Image (cartoon, rainbow, N blue to C red):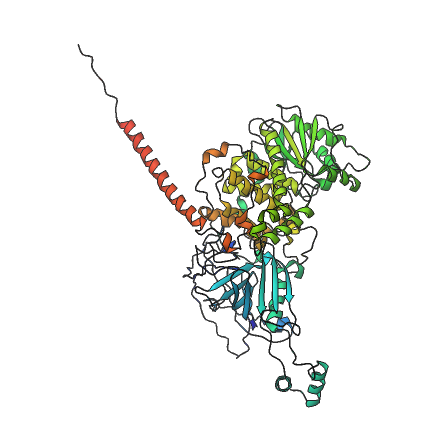
């Protein structure tokens, strides 16, 4: 049965037992039940199936935990403490309406928490049980069916099977769910495991659960349970076709209730409910909301100076509602000029500084397409503004305008009022097209990649199948475009203006990757957080629409893996320069897992303005709180701080790119390393720390000897 918090119907007793906090390590999900590594509450794939005592430490991270495909080690998942804090009662219910099925009687217990059953998950702060379905079978595509208990909370789905030793466990944040479908009907399903639900996820996997069908309701059961007259029973049996057609089947209550609860909490935006991030109340030592401060970041780059100024013209988001409140603009441009330029740029997204070279003063600025249209409109203010950007760099008398789109698409946009800059109108400007396709092409490419990677891999046709997805082709185009921008700024000392159509998808990919190549600060853990906050979040990448947070419209045309492509590109650069990044792939996977999980408020909504209106910084926890509070879980033992001053020029030809199998194929047990990499990294970090301390001791000893040993004075021999 499926039961939720509330009054237990098998008796009137309301027993609430205090439960001492104990810690259960997260476990495997779609694959084998073997144990490896430590478990995580933070939220990427969970690994081991073992259990251990759970301490009651405050301030530790907990969290999301999307379950992995098999008993592997967690990817990017530090073994942090999870604390159960919800106080409620467990119940079973069989009534027809959802509210009466799962009665939620609020009952506060000041001295303890609700007793959890062994097959229920450890709750994170703000999480509470919504119900439990027993005798459910998880149809694992790798290790076969597993029968156990399926629990649903307001944050995640949790399945536990005691059939293996240690028990098999799977947990999936509901934010990861893209759509839910029922499989089989009450009167049509025949055969074992043909009746249940299938869950399609945003992280490349699908989950299927089989529910037990109810027993036939014969006339004796109707007589006993419904207390009807013989005549009414006869009419009902006749209407339902029992006479002459076999027994009646009802839709299993557990499936119906599981589906209803999943739909409610996986798609809160569609049901007028708050995201779980507003319920999550974990405390971390570090406050991630302070990692990025726009003025401080601009000052780090050496601004303001004689050529660039900082303005708060958009402080109320009136000039451009999708831009941040603080801009860096050419000092020669007045506020009136900025308003005039905004009228000529799509969505009011004018060219604004992203990065400035510390020596040459060459810059990367970003914007949206000009509103040229079919008639070829011009704006003297916009042309003068581009000239101001070029003049701010005294070392060059030329400027490059990098249009991320294919030239055919840019021309087609003229019919809708957009377009691109004319080299005749913009003096000393050279326009180059980078041939990166739109969001619809990228979405279809990822769909094909999912078919290749999950659940099974066709080894005989792996390369041809991968090529047919064109995923690596798109990765190459994005990387090549970013490399061209970095080369123009670093080698030619020329300023670059970057835009696509609206300037919040491909533009963010290009500027962020170019800055990552040029500035070693963004290759550190806090710097990477600043890069995402600055180029993606503050400049209005539409995370809510591209990811579909809490929205049940899985076929929405606005969805696209734009940010996933960016992270994939970062990983490609990391593989070519393993010593240049302070963090490992585990951090990238953790970021992607929480992109979907809705555990943190970092990626919610479409713009800085929307996050301000929803008070995200005061009502939710930042993802960077988790990461900055546990930096050792993401540190790269091979990192060389001297590379912070190096510029990276990665090779972008196809033969140097490879599929990021640690992410796309992580649910397949056969694709995982036998030894958990993150454990080896921790060992290397420990050894590295010991060696560094020994070097410091020897240096101090050497300095002390040089200080105390006076030079010997030799007397001349007469």
- Residue pictured at 61% horizontal, 61% vertical: 199
State which quadrant residue 217 falls in: bottom right
Residue 53 percent across, percent down from the top left = 40, 61
Residue 51 versus residue 498 in the image, above or below:
below
Give whichever of 151, 93 is nearer the camera: 151
Check the image and report above or below for 346 versus 363. below
Quadrant where the C terminus lies?
Answer: top left
Q: Is residue 265 visible?
A: no
Q: Position of residue 260 (x, y in %)?
A: 63, 67
The outermost residue toward the bottom is 230
Which quadrant of the rendered structure holds the N terminus?
Answer: bottom right
Task: Tell which of 555 and 603 is nearer to you.
Answer: 555
On the picture, is 125 further left or further right than 537? left
Q: Is residue 355 visible?
A: yes
Question: How many marks on residues?
Answer: 0
Quarter residue 531 falls in:
top right
Q: Position of residue 710 (x, y in %)?
A: 25, 23
Looking at the image, the residue that sits furthest to the left is: 718
Q: Position of residue 459 (x, y in %)?
A: 55, 51
526 or 439, which lies in front?
439
Q: Is residue 242 above or below residue 117?
A: below
Is 324 placed left or right of 120 in the picture?
right
Position of 630 with respect to 619 (left or right) is left
Q: Residue furthest right?
A: 375
Residue farthest to the top, as pictured: 718
């Amino acid at each position: 049965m499926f039961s939720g918090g509330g009054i237990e119907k098998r008796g009137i007793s309301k027993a609430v037992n205090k439960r001492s906090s104990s810690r259960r390590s997260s476990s495997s999900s779609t694959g084998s039940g073997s144990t490896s590594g430590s478990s995580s509450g933070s939220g990427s794939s969970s690994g081991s199936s073992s259990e251990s005592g759970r301490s009651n430490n405050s301030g530790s991270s907990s969290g999301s935990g999307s379950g992995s495909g098999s008993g592997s080690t967690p990817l990017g998942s530090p073994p942090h403490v999870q604390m159960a804090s919800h106080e409620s009662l467990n119940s079973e219910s069989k009534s027809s309406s959802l509210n009466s099925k799962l009665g939620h009687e609020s009952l506060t217990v000041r001295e303890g928490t609700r007793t959890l059953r062994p097959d229920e998950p450890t709750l994170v702060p703000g999480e509470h049980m919504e119900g439990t379905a027993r005798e459910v079978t998880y149809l694992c595509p790798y290790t076969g069916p597993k029968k156990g208990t399926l629990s649903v909370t307001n944050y995640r789905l949790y399945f536990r099977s005691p059939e293996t030793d240690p028990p098999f466990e799977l947990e999936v944040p509901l934010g990861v769910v893209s759509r839910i479908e029922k499989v089989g009907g009450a009167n049509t399903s025949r055969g074992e495991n043909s009746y249940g639900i299938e869950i399609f996820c945003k992280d490349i996997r699908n989950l299927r659960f089989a529910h037990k069908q109810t027993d036939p309701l014969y006339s004796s059961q109707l007589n006993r349970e419904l207390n009807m007259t013989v005549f009414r029973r006869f009419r009902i049996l006749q209407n339902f076709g029992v006479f002459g057609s076999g027994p009646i089947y009802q839709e299993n209550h557990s499936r119906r209730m599981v589906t209803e609860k999943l739909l409610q909490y996986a798609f809160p935006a569609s049901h007028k409910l708050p995201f779980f991030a507003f319920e999550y109340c974990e405390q971390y030592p570090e406050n991630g909301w302070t990692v990025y401060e726009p003025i401080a970041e601009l000052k780090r780059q050496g601004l303001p100076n004689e050529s660039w100024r900082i303005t708060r013209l958009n402080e109320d988001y009136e000039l451009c509602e999708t831009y941040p409140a603080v801009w860096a603009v050419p000092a020669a441009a007045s506020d009136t000029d900025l308003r005039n330029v905004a009228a000529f740029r799509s969505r009011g997204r004018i060219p604004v500084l992203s990065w400035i070279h510390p020596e040459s003063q060459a810059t990367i600025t970003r914007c949206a397409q000009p509103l040229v249209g079919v008639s070829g409109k011009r704006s003297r203010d916009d042309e003068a503004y581009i000239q101001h950007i070029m003049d701010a760099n005294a070392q060059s008398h030329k400027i490059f305008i990098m249009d991320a789109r294919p030239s055919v698409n840019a021309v087609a946009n003229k019919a809708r009022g957009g377009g691109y800059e004319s080299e005749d109108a913009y003096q000393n400007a050279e326009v180059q097209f980078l041939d990166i396709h739109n969001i619809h092409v990228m979405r279809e490419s990822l769909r094909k990649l999912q078919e290749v990677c999950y659940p099974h891999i066709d080894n005989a046709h792996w390369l041809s199948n991968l090529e047919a997805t064109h995923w690596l082709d798109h990765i190459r185009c994005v990387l090549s475009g970013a490399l061209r921008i970095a080369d123009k700024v670093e080698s030619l000392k020329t300023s670059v203006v970057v835009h696509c159509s609206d300037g919040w998808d491909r533009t963010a990919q290009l500027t962020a990757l170019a800055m990552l190549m040029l500035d070693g600060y963004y290759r550190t853990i806090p710097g990477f957080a600043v890069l995402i906050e600055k180029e993606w979040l503050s400049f209005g990448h539409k995370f809510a629409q591209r990811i579909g947070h809490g929205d049940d419209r899985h076929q929405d045309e606005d969805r696209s893996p734009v940010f996933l492509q960016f992270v994939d590109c970062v990983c490609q650069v990391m593989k070519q320069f393993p010593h240049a990044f302070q963090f490992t792939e585990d951090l990238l996977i953790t970021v992607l897992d929480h992109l979907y999980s809705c555990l943190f408020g970092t990626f919610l909504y479409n713009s800085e303005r929307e996050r301000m209106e929803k008070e995200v910084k005061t009502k939710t926890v930042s993802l960077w709180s988790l990461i900055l509070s546990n930096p050792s879980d993401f540190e790269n033992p091979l990192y060389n701080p001297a590379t912070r001053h190096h510029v990276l020029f990665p090779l972008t030809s196809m033969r140097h790119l490879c599929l990021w199998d640690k992410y796309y194929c992580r649910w397949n047990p056969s694709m995982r390393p036998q030894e958990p990499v993150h454990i080896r990294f921790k060992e290397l970090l420990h050894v590295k720390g010991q060696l560094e301390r020994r070097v410091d001791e020897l240096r101090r000893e050497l300095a002390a000897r040089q200080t105390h040993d006076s030079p010997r004075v030799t007397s001349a021999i007469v």
